[in-house]
Image (cartoon, coloured by chain):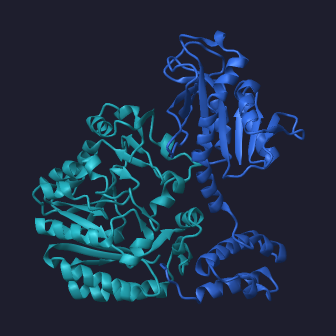
């Protein structure tokens, strides 16, 4: 799977680096000074690199934990996100990472201890108020968990900090390490969904909708709280019937009591990212969708966006109380 | 198109012979050899970074290269202990002069092992655990301005090491070493050609784009809009010729309106 590993000199002897290298004895190992020498260079082709991404082991120096934009909250006043990885195993055509990064290689920041120290300090700064931490903005939280041991390192920290909540955003079915341990109340495993036909068209290499749903059922049975993320909502002529079918399928099976939150938002990208993706995938139908430009973002025209949001909101709120529902009604 | 750069004629000669390249007489600053179909082009750069950078730049200017082209620096190099005659693809290039590094992106199953390389200003027998040459950093630094990191590579055959130093190397031996690696060179072409084809498909203009530009007047921003609309057209209506819908338009602006109205007013289905 991984045939090339770049290793920053600074973390070459970090225990996590050594453990990961041991898993890939056949991979070509290449030392580098800083991961940006590879990852941030221009004249790289994201689409080509996605065929065989390398792994880059690095140290995150600053900006380890950052405040989230206000509209992405799920019930708390203080919200932060962090990324132990950059880039994702999957290849979802709507993903903003393709527009944001020059390279498709996976960067793994092995200094988890520094992330945890920073979170600890943020939690202390907020006194007794709840603080939410989101993982999965710049990567899939669980897809590489068997390699990265991300959950087994971070969940014990949240277990001992019950005022904080961890959201693990994912499309992955790599839930073994979660099922192996006792669930904690302040962790939400939030699964992203689009209807089956749309997922098959756009979410390349990601587990299919049924497998994700099965992962939810397994987690709920084990006592974990789950979240549902219908973001981005993808427009197609028959979107109403496709999303109805998806919602029916999900809500007829899951345990609403163990559903922490549901959020949704229309497909939108910063204009620069959209234009970059359009060039990378000129034959991709998604980029020939009905579109409008507002505030330097490109998304669906307001009438389509609002119609879809209202339609989905009506169905979702029939299944879940409004205090668990967090629609993203931002303009694009 | 494949662009190859060799410092010496003895490094190039087996490649010229195998791929039946002939010298093009229209270029006189550097000797450029081309295949009959002009798909393979080889420059003999001369030794050193300045010559190499100049040759890459010259070939680009003379042959009007494309962003989907393959760029290769092929030659011999020293190494502390890799046996003479073995070949390596380069996965890291360091310029000894200023310690700048580049990382050629090997996103395919390479036809041989890969290793790191140091480009020197002067020949040296103070071998380290890296290939030694005098051209790769300049080649890469210039080629990366013209192409994509996944399509730019250095392939080096080990000509000298601590046991057999540079004094044992001569033109005849170099020819034989390179000739022995022709299959590796061909395999490398096979790895890179599909990637190059994919880049070509990404950067190619949509059908009829040039016809539109010739027939109607478009400002710079309108021509970008046209490009985008023609792409959307081909995605939305793959079986419908665009021409009948726009033939009656008198201006570029009205063409753009016609195209965008037609796209806007059609139903959108994202999957088949």
Q: Is residue B26 left or right of residue B200?
A: right
| Residue A230 x %, y % | 34, 75
The colour assigned to chain B within the rendered structure: blue
Identify whether A161 is placed above or below B155. below
The colour assigned to chain A within the rendered structure: cyan
Q: Can residue A223 be seen?
A: no
- Look at 44% across and 70% down and name the residue there: A202
Q: Is residue A268 left or right of residue A321?
A: right
Identify whether A234 is placed above or below B180. below
Total number of numbered labels? 0
- Look at 64% across and 43% down and name the residue there: B144
Identify whether B10 is placed above or below A189. above
- Look at 44% across and 34% down and name the residue there: A30
| Residue B237 x %, y % | 61, 81
Q: Quadrant of residue A92?
A: bottom left
Q: Quadrant of residue B10?
A: top right
Q: Nearer the viewer, residue A306 or A229?
A: A229
| Residue A58 x %, y % | 38, 41
| Residue B211 x %, y % | 80, 73
Q: Can residue B130 be seen?
A: yes
């Amino acid at each position: 799977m991984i045939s090339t590993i770049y290793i920053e000199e600074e973390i070459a002897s970090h225990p996590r680096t050594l453990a990961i290298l041991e898993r890939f004895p056949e991979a070509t190992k290449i030392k580098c000074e800083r991961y940006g020498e590879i990852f941030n260079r221009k004249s790289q082709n994201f689409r080509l690199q996605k065929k065989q991404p390398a792994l880059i082991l690095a140290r995150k120096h600053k900006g380890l934990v950052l405040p989230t934009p206000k509209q992405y909250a799920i019930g708390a006043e203080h919200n932060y996100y962090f990324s132990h990885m950059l880039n994702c195993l999957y290849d979802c055509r709507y993903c903003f990472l393709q527009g944001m990064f020059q390279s498709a290689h996976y960067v793994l920041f092995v200094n988890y201890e520094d992330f945890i120290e920073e979170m600890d300090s943020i939690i202390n700064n907020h006194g007794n108020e709840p603080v939410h931490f989101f993982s999965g903005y710049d990567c899939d939280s669980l897809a590489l968990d068997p390699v990265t041991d991300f959950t087994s390192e971070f969940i014990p920290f949240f277990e001992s900090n019950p005022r904080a909540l961890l959201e693990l955003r994912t499309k992955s079915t790599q839930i073994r390490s979660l099922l192996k341990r006792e669930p904690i109340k302040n962790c939400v495993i939030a699964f992203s969904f689009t209807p089956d036909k749309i997922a098959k068209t756009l979410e390349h290499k990601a587990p299919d909708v049924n497998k994700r749903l099965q992962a939810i059922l397994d987690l709920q049975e084990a006592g974990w709280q789950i979240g549902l993320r219908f973001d981005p909502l993808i427009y197609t002529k028959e979107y109403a019937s496709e999303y109805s079918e998806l919602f029916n399928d999900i809500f007829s099976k899951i345990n609403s009591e163990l559903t922490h939150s549901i959020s949704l938002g229309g497909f939108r990208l910063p204009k620069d990212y959209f234009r970059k993706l359009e060039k990378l995938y000129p034959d991709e139908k998604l980029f020939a969708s009905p579109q409008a430009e507002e505030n330097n973002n490109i998304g669906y025209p307001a009438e389509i966006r609002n119609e879809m949001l209202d339609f989905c909101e009506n169905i979702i709120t029939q299944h879940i109380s409004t205090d668990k529902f967090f629609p993203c009604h931002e303009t694009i | 198109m494949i662009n190859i750069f060799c410092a010496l004629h003895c490094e190039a000669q087996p490649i010229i012979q195998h791929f039946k390249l002939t010298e093009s007489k229209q270029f006189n600053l550097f000797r450029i050899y081309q295949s009959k179909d002009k798909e393979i082009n080889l420059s003999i750069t001369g030794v050193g970074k300045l010559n190499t950078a100049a040759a890459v730049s010259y070939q680009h200017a003379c042959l009007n290269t494309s962003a989907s082209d393959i760029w290769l620096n092929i030659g011999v190099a020293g190494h502390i202990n890799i046996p003479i005659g073995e070949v390596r693809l380069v996965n890291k290039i360091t310029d000894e002069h200023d310690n700048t590094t580049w990382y050629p992106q090997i996103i395919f199953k390479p036809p041989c092992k890969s290793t790191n390389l140091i480009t020197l200003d002067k020949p040296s027998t103070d071998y380290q655990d890296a290939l030694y040459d005098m051209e790769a950093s300049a080649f890469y630094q210039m080629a990366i301005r013209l192409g994509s990191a996944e399509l730019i590579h250095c392939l080096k055959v080990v000509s000298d090491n601590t046991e057999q130093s540079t004094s044992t190397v001569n033109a005849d031996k170099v020819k034989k070493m390179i000739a022995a690696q022709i299959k590796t060179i061909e395999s490398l072409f096979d790895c890179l050609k599909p990637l190059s084809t994919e880049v070509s498909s990404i950067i190619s203009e949509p059908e009829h784009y040039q016809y539109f530009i010739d027939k109607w007047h478009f400002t710079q921003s309108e021509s970008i809009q046209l490009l985008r609309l023609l792409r959307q057209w081909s995605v939305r209506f793959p079986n419908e010729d665009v021409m009948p819908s726009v033939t009656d338009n008198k201006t570029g602006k009205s063409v753009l309106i016609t195209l965008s109205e037609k796209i806007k007013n059609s139903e959108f289905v994202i999957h088949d």
